[in-house]
Image (tube, grey):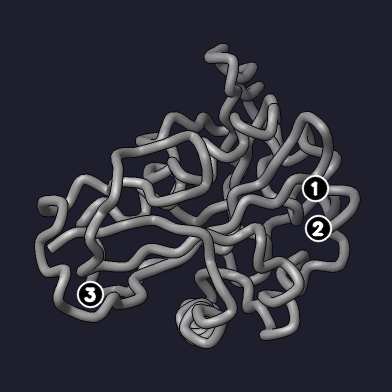
Amino acid sequence: MSVAIRPAGVEDVDAMQDLIARYAREDRMLERSRDFLLEHLRDFVVAEDNVTLAREASVERGVVRAGVGAPGRDSDLPARFMGCCALAVLTRELAEVRSLAVRPEASGRGIGGALVRACVAEARRLGVRRVFALTLVPEFFEKCGFALTSLGRLPEKSAAECPVCPKRFACDEHAMLLHLDGTAPRPLVPGEPVGYTRLFLGREPEGSR
């Protein structure tokens, strides 16, 4: 079985919305409306299996090898949606990896990492210098080369989008940052707040222990 990463199309929107909504109901990510997904469709890549791979990984947004199976295998079977991820460019220097979701039954196959790598490759192609993500699973992004940072160091996100986020009073996400020039982000200062709730409201997220 092969897995490929490709740009999302309108035919993927229903599957993307259903998968994201599934995790949103578990309070693991933000829900995205159909209108949002259509409006930002060019930001998304999707993973699908049972696809004949035409070429190896590229920095361009085309088919990217996820390292599962062999080229051409199962090419007679229909492609199946396995996950999605988006790269949102916020400024000339900063982009966000967001809406990363993989079907539960596909967990552990390297699909999430392949989706993130495709978004990072696109950021490099565009000339963006830094890529960040907000996540409940910082260990995953550490494996992708990201380092823990403070949301306060990302004002393009914390000042513009976080104040209207439905989770702003209960933000338990970690900010992860990747410098595309290979340098390491500045280490966190002890006690430096990470999530939005601690940073701007000065308290623990609602429901935290």
Does residue 35 appear left or right of residue 148 in this picture? right
Q: CA distance from mark 3 to mark 1?
A: 32 Å
Q: Is residue 61 left or right of residue 3?
A: right
Q: Helix, strand or loop at disc 2?
A: helix
Q: Give x and y (percent) for residue 55.
A: 30, 43
Label located before the other in sequence (3 or 2): 3
Q: Which SS class for mark 1?
A: helix
Query: Which of labels 3 and 1 is toward the front?
Result: 3
Amino acid type shown at disc 1? Lys
The residue labelled by disc 1 is 157
Report how far apart the C-alphas of labels 3 and 2 lie in the structure: 31 Å
Q: Quadrant of residue 166?
A: bottom right
- Give the residue pinned by disc 2: 162
Residue type at the position of mark 3? Glu
Identify the image quadrant of residue 125: top right
Q: Is any part of residue 20 visible from this angle?
A: yes
In the image, which disc is placed on residue 105?
3
The CA distance from mark 1 to mark 2 is: 6 Å
- Residue displayed at 47% across by 83% down: 15
Q: Is 191 on the left or on the right of 135, as rendered?
A: right
In the rendered image, the vertical position of residue 157 relative to residue 48, given as above or below = above
* 1 and 2 marks in contact (CB < 8 Å): yes
Image coordinates of residue 120 in percent, x first then y, are 53, 38
Q: Locate the N terminus by quadrant.
A: bottom left
